[in-house]
Amino acid sequence: MNGRRFIPFGYSAGLNTHDRRGHRMIARHLQNLGRSNIVHLSAQWSHHIPNFYPHWMFNCSPWIINPYGFGSSRPFHWTPSFNWNPSFHQRPPLSFYGDSWTRGGYAPQTSNSYTSRSSGCSMEANIDAPQCKRRKCDPANKEELSESNETNHAAQDKTYSVAPHDMELETFCCSNIAESQETGAIKVGAVHRSWDDVTSLYKSSHGTSESNETSDGKQREAFDFSVLSYNILAQDLLENNSYLYRHCSQPLLQWGFRFPNILKELRQLDADIMCLQEVQDNHYGMQLKPVLESLGYHCEYKMRTGNKRDGCAICFKRSKFSLVSASPVEFYRPMIQLLDRDNIGLVVLLQPTLSQSAARVCVANTHLLYNPRRGDIKLTQLAILLAEINKLASDGKDGHCPIILCGDFNSVPDSPLYNFIRNGKLIYAGLQIGKVSGQETGHRGQRALTNPLWPPSLGISSECQYETMKDAEGPVDGLDNSEKLMADIKNYPMDQQTASAICHKFKLLSVYSHYLPGSNKTEVTTCHSKSAVTVDYIFYSAAKHNGAALSGEDGHLQLLGKLALLTEQDLWTVNRLPNENNSSDHLPLLAKFRHKL
């Protein structure tokens, strides 16, 4: 780093020889530190420069220098200023250290405070790197990097821990979602998001309000619950892909700053079911799980396979649901070349506590492969997850209980993969492998999908069901299993009988329409330094009639409301994601459903 960037224009000329030497010493010290480690500056240099503090408001560099943590008596503050402005008044971020909240820079280091760690990656922009959270390392350095990361992870686990009873968060701008529904707006971090009540759509489509009575005249109970889907951005992935977050100053990217913000969002949104992605294992075990359990949640977690340290979690309120079964899903199959990636899924079957005779609810959470040019892998991973959902959600009568499918699907709206989830079928003959997710806008990934899409050894049919389950059903009406399979295929439309087609039997709708009401502006769920797009979804099972979802039917859910998304322009006004108040590069998705018992 060139230390001269830290001297305001015209300022160095007014320094005496002693002061100039101090600046040169600082420059050499910064070069030794490197950009990824510039968080503190020893107070031993501050006496070389008179009136040191005021001139840092002229700092032209986005990298932060703050000697406050080394015992300096001067009240240095966090000042991420790119250009000097006479009217500049930056409110320092709220940070949680040890037992207290502090403003105006880093608190003095103690044994319980978080210490910045370097994973060997620079905060410099990596222009040539792909837009993904997958680090490309020199094979010669893998052993060294792995050894360094293990040491750093151990140090992080030891130096920072937050107990549930020590977490004193700021007063929420909205105490709960119920109050927010009355006002029609929710402030999540720095952004205002409206609450969209969609119950009026059902009434207008039916002509009258829905009936709460059964066919025999008895009153039906309604069970309302909310579901959250949120990619919270694993710290390891953030540090290994720092070029995605060039817009954000480094102190805001530290886990010690990010975790309180994320926890505040989770408590503010107060969902009955939370589906979280990119949950780092050490943060889950030491921090997130203890805090959520103290708030009345039961937590299930599945870490990615291989050497990946993040995974998916499903957490639900014990006062609303009880766990019937949980099924972690690994997409990696060592004997199948197509499935050589470490992505995973998690499926749980929940019983509403209000009535033990009520239909159960199946909730699935996943984070599919990012690579835009490997649509074949994404579709196969999705098929495995749908097969597991079919197994858990089956009611034994060729039907299924209500289904909620959440996650980061790394696919954009109206892409072939998205339409497969929505429409229940996909004819992939001639479909280019790079067009499956809709992320690839270049000319890469031109190879057509193979037929069949996945090998028979996977044990999953083109209907996204386990083949062994078909075998277990046994003969029906005197037909053997092969004849029964052919009879089932004949019941599908002609285009689904083709060899190059896959299908599923779930009737799934997206909570979000992906466009702002009354405009052609697209919603986004993630916005960082490289792109802004929708990749996160909440799908739910609903009966369809003329393209609309019917409410209150047996085995299906009625959507009551949703937390509105934002446009890319909206997020640019708060410096994209993450920022001072929103500590993930994704927005949380929230929806409220009604389940007729």
Image: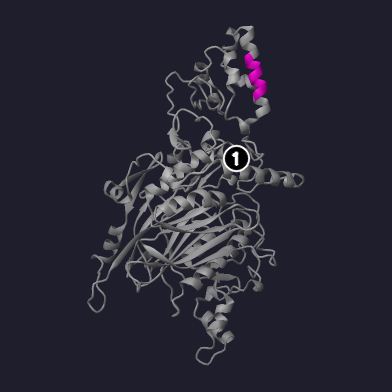
Q: What is the secondary structure assignment of the residue under circle 1?
A: helix
Q: Quadrant of the N terminus?
A: top right
Specify the quadrant that holds the C terminus: bottom left
Task: State the residue lying farthest toward the bottom.
Answer: 478
578 lies left or right of 551:
right
Is residue 572 on the magenta stretch? no
Report if residue 521 is visible in the image.
no
List x then y, in percent, for residue 124. 63, 34
Q: How many marks?
A: 1
Position of 566 relative to 44 (above/below) = below
Going 62% across and 62% down the picture, which residue do you hit?
376
Q: Is residue 567 left or right of residue 126?
A: left
Q: Measuring from the top left, give residue 218's x and y in whole percent.
A: 23, 75
Q: Relative to 97, does residue 321 appear above or below in the rendering?
A: below
Image position of 177 (left or right of 394): left
Residue at 53%, 52% (x, y): give it: 285
Q: Is residue 376 above or below residue 395?
A: above
Which quadrant of the figure has residue 338? bottom right
**Residue 110 placement (x, y as % from top left):** 53, 34
Q: Name the one closer to the observer, 9 or 206.
A: 9
Say which of 210 and 46 sits in front. Answer: 46
Q: Is residue 28 magenta?
A: yes
**Camera-side residue: 191 or 51?**
51
Which of 323/423 is in front?
323
Q: Amino acid at mark 1?
A: Ser
Q: Which residue is mark 1?
A: 242
Main secondary structure along the magenta-highlighted residues: helix
- How many neighbours does mark 1 have within 10 angstroms: few (below 14), some (14-19), or many (20 or more)? many
